[in-house]
Amino acid sequence: MPGHFVGSPSCRRAHHLGTKLEWSFTLRYLPSGGNILLLYLILMGLAALILPIMARRLWPLVLGASLVLFAATMIWPTGTHGTGPTTIQSFPGGPPIQNWAAWQVLFIPALVIGWKWDAWRVPERIDRFLAPLLMVTLIVGITVEDLMMMPSLRPHLVLLVDKVDLGPVRAVLAFLVVTCVYGVFRVVLRWLRRDLLRPLVATGARSLDSYVLQALCLLAVPTLIVDRPWKPSLAVAIAVAVFAACWVWAEIRTRLGVDKLHRAPMLLAASVQHAWVSSRNGGLKDGEQRDEPAGQAQAGIDRRTDVERSRRESRRG
């Protein structure tokens, strides 16, 4: 019944259960603050198409297509109030949130870099040029902020730092900031024991898992618990709780030795088979099960040795 449907602020525009379900299944509904989820879903779908191409060593084609698509969005921008086939909206008829054709330039080139991570020796290069990278990032960031504060230049610079269509300056700064954060984190890990930063290291090693958990919480909290959990104290408490959940999940995977999630069903099947075999053998341990055949084999060897010894002695006699 419609009365039993749990709604959220963005979904309350719909008055019928069918409309709400239609928005959910066609990905036209997002919770308050969750508009980035649909963008990531689109980008992960693109990754499924791109990985087979890169497996054929065609990464230059992938990188070139990404840059061409981004250049096209700069020539024909969506605009803050415009719409287009690549524009994402948080709800039907709502304002544009992101132009995924532009935002893919943050994702696909990074995917190519990750694919060639070892071949290009990316960590060593970042370590070598970390100081210049930090200086360039600070200079570019401060310069852009100062220019945007000038009323005469602001209208002309909006497209360069636009969020919906992802201006080129914003894209470059994003790559610079992420690279610097990664480099600084590597330096800090050399100076400190890894145990001191274990929560960050563990969750970082399971970044995709952490993202999925955050996405689930971002969907569940505004829909089931609090309509708009954006008050400072409440937001901090939720953020800490979600981070703790991501850390606990990462530690569980480490303790269970599940390096890849697709191996989890195999490990579960092996555990069930092991328990079944143990129950059939009266609860004996593996070592005890293997000791009995080994002892029988050794007894057989001893008997054969005795027979051969007796034959040699009979021949001598």
Image (spheres, rainbow, N blue to C red):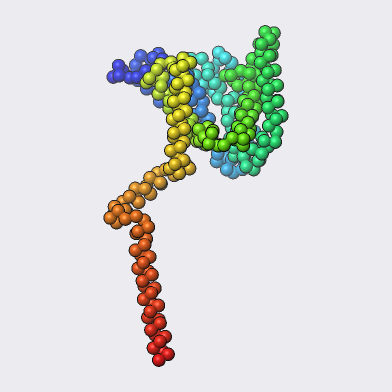
Q: Is residue 173 left or right of residue 252?
A: right
Task: Name the residue nearer the viewer: 112 or 313.
Answer: 313
In the image shown, does 156 or 149 lie closer to the viewer? 149
Q: Residue furthest bottom?
A: 317
Relative image position of residue 164 (x, y in whole percent):
57, 19
Q: State whether residue 59 appears in this view.
A: no
Q: Quadrant of the N terminus?
A: top left
The picture places residue 72, in percent across and down from the top left corner, at 63, 24
Q: How many marks?
A: 0
Residue at image coords 33%, 50%: 275
Residue 94 in sight here = yes
Residue nearest the observer in this picture, 301 or 61:
301
Where is residue 120? Give x, y as percent: 66, 40
Residue 298 found in image quarter: bottom left
Q: Is residue 38 above or below residue 259?
A: above
53 shown above or below 285: above
- Identify the residue at horizontal 34%, vertical 16% (top origin): 16
Q: Nearer the viewer, residue 166 or 18?
A: 166
Q: Residue at x 36, y 62 (%)?
A: 291
Q: At 40% from the left edge and 23% from the top edge, which residue is drawn?
A: 220
In which quadrant will I find the C terminus?
bottom left
Residue 228, horizontal then vertical, whole percent: 43, 15
Report whether 195 appears left or right of 59.
left
